[in-house]
Image (tube, rainbow, N blue to C red):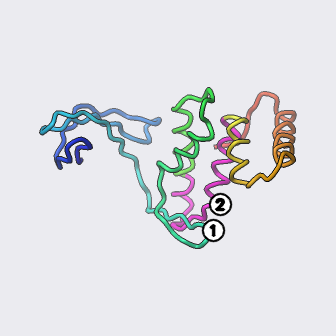
C-alpha cells in the first residue's frame, strides 16, 4: 500500500480488525520511510460495477461518491457514522448481487432515497429536492405530505428501507 505522505510503495500493517459489521477490514499502517501512520479499509468486491449516466456516459462505480451523497444529505443530522456505513454497504451489496454490471444512475439514486427514508426524514427531503429536481415549494409540500402519510401508517418509524 502506497504511503499517502511520502509515496513509498511499502507500508507495514500494525493492526487489523473487522469493520462495518464484518463487511470490511480496517488496517492501521505505518510507513517505514517517513513513519507516517494511516488507515486503510478492505472490502469484498463481487464484481466491477459501472454507472450509466442519463447521458449514456459510463464511469466506474465509486463507493466514496455514494458516501458523500449520504454525508451531504445528513449534514448536521444526529445519525451515527456506523448507520451511514451500513446503509451504503447495503446498497453496494444489492448492486453487486443484482447480476448486472452496468447500473443506471437513477437506480442508485432511488436506492439512496429509500435508505435515507429509513435513516432520517430531513435528509430524505434534502436529497429528494435535488434528485427529483424540485422547482418550487409545492414540490416540498408534496414530499412532506408523502412522509406524513408514511408516518401516520407507521408511527414507530419502522420502514422496509435498506
Q: Is residue 139 magenta?
A: no
- Tell me the element at label 1: loop
Q: Residues within 10 Å of mark 2 (few under 14, many from 20)?
A: some
Q: Which residues are magenta?
A: 94-119
Please indicate whether residue 29 sits to the left or right of residue 76 in the image.
Answer: left
Q: Earlier in the sequence, mark 2 or mark 1?
A: 1
Residue positioned 48% across, 50% down in the render: 63
Q: 14 and 18: which one is in front?
A: 14
Q: Residue furthest left?
A: 33
Magenta segment main secondary structure: helix
- Check residue 106 in the rendering and tell me which mark sits there, or answer none: 2
Q: Residues within 10 Å of mark 1 (few under 14, many from 20)?
A: few
In which quarter of the view is residue 3 placed? top left
Evaluate if marks 2 and 1 touch, with contact meaning CB atoms under 8 Å apart.
yes
- How many marks the image carries: the answer is 2
138 displayed left or right of 76: right
Image x and y of residue 48, in percent? 44, 62
Q: Disc 2 vs disc 1: which is toward the camera?
A: 1
Quarter occupied by residue 31 = top left
Find disc 1 in the rendering and name its residue. Answer: 54
Q: CA distance from mark 2 to mark 1?
A: 8 Å
Q: Residue furthest bottom?
A: 56
**Whole-percent x, y for residue 90 in the image:** 56, 46
Q: Nearer the viewer, residue 139 or 52?
A: 139
Amino acid at each position: 500500500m502506497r504511503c499517502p505522505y511520502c509515496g513509498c510503495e511499502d507500508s507495514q500493517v500494525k493492526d487489523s480488525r473487522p469493520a462495518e459489521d464484518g463487511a470490511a477490514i480496517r488496517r492501521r499502517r505505518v510507513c517505514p520511510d517517513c513513519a507516517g501512520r494511516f488507515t486503510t479499509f478492505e472490502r469484498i468486491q463481487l464484481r466491477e460495477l459501472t454507472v450509466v449516466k442519463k447521458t449514456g456516459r459510463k464511469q466506474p462505480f465509486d463507493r466514496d461518491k455514494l458516501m458523500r451523497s449520504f454525508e451531504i444529505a445528513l449534514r448536521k443530522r444526529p445519525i451515527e457514522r456506523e448507520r451511514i456505513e451500513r446503509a451504503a454497504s447495503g446498497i453496494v451489496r444489492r448492486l453487486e448481487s443484482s447480476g448486472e454490471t452496468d447500473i443506471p444512475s437513477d437506480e442508485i439514486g432511488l436506492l439512496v432515497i429509500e435508505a435515507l427514508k429509513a435513516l432520517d426524514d430531513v435528509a430524505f427531503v434534502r436529497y429528494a429536492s435535488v434528485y427529483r429536481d424540485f422547482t418550487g415549494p409545492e414540490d416540498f409540500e408534496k414530499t412532506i405530505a408523502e412522509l406524513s402519510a408514511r408516518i401516520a401508517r407507521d408511527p414507530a418509524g419502522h420502514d422496509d428501507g435498506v
